Image: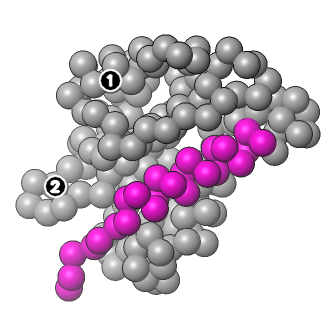
């Protein structure tokens, strides 16, 4: 069996696009945006988008999608894909404190298997003031040692002082 190869750039682009699309959709509906959306709604929308683009991301159509599955690491994981019996596991946090980000990263670290390539991803959506650094991202790096693999922002339409950053960590 060949090791699983994931197009992580395409994966992040899809995760980012979902967040930006929800910002646009909810702003046009009720003048809110991405942070009006509950975390689980965002997770489901990301799951749908990944599943629709599974061939491009995973190189195969043969995958299984589950959500909120207990992987034995301290609670259910938000989003899981099984690709050729290899788990691809995601945890998400939206607009939380940096300590909550660390808790999810630690949860994912419990699933690491040293004898093979792991596919563990932490996705953070944070609001922050424009032209400033997001302190949560800095604290996650300082505390956990993990840097964002991908990190991109877009303006929050309902508040011109804020942006939303979408950060993906590969654990």
Exactly how many numbered labels are in the figure? 2
At 51% across and 55% down in the image, what residue appears?
13
Q: Is residue 46 left or right of residue 152?
A: right
Give the quadrant of residue 1.
bottom left
95 or 129, nearer to the observer: 129
Q: Is residue 20 magenta?
A: yes
Instruction: Give the main secondary structure, helix, strand or loop, of the magenta stretch.
Output: helix
At 33% across and 17% down in the image, what residue appears?
139
Pair 1/2: label in front: 1
Please state the extent of the stretch shown in magenta in the rendering: 1-24
Colour treatment of the image: one colour
165 or 64, nearer to the observer: 165
Circle 1 SS class: helix
Circle 2 SS class: loop
In the rendered structure, find residue 113 and report the number of the disc placed on it: 2
Residue 47, percent from left and from top: 58, 59
Mark 1 or mark 2, earlier in chain: 2
Residue assigned mark 1: 140
The CA distance from mark 1 to mark 2 is 22 Å
Circle 1/circle 2 CB separation < 8 Å: no
Q: Determine whether 141 is above or below 113 in the image.
A: above
Q: Determine whether 152 is above or below 133 in the image.
A: below
Q: Is residue 13 left or right of residue 113?
A: right
Residue 19, percent from left and from top: 63, 44
At 64% across and 51% down in the image, what residue appears?
18
Mark 1 Cα-neighbour bin, 10 Å: few <14, some 14–19, many ≥20: some
Residue 9, percent from left and from top: 40, 58
Residue 103 makes an appearance in the image: yes
Q: Determine whether 54 is above or below 128 in the image.
A: below
């Amino acid at each position: 069996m060949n090791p699983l190869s994931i197009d992580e750039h395409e994966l992040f682009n899809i995760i980012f696009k979902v967040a930006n699309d929800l910002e646009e959709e909810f702003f046009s509906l009720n003048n809110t945006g991405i942070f009006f959306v509950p975390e689980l709604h965002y997770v489901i929308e990301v799951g749908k988008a990944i599943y629709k683009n599974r061939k491009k991301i995973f190189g195969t159509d043969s995958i299984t999608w589950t959500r909120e599955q207990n992987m034995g690491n301290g609670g259910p994981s938000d989003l899981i894909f099984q690709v050729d019996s290899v788990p691809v596991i995601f945890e998400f946090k939206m607009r939380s404190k940096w300590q909550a980000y660390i808790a999810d990263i630690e949860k994912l670290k419990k699933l690491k298997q040293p004898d093979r390539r792991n596919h563990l991803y932490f996705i953070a959506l944070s609001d922050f003031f424009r032209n400033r650094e997001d302190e949560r991202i800095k604290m996650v790096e300082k505390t956990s040692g993990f840097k964002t693999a991908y990190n991109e922002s877009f303006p929050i339409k309902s508040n011109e002082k804020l942006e939303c950053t979408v950060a993906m960590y590969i654990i």
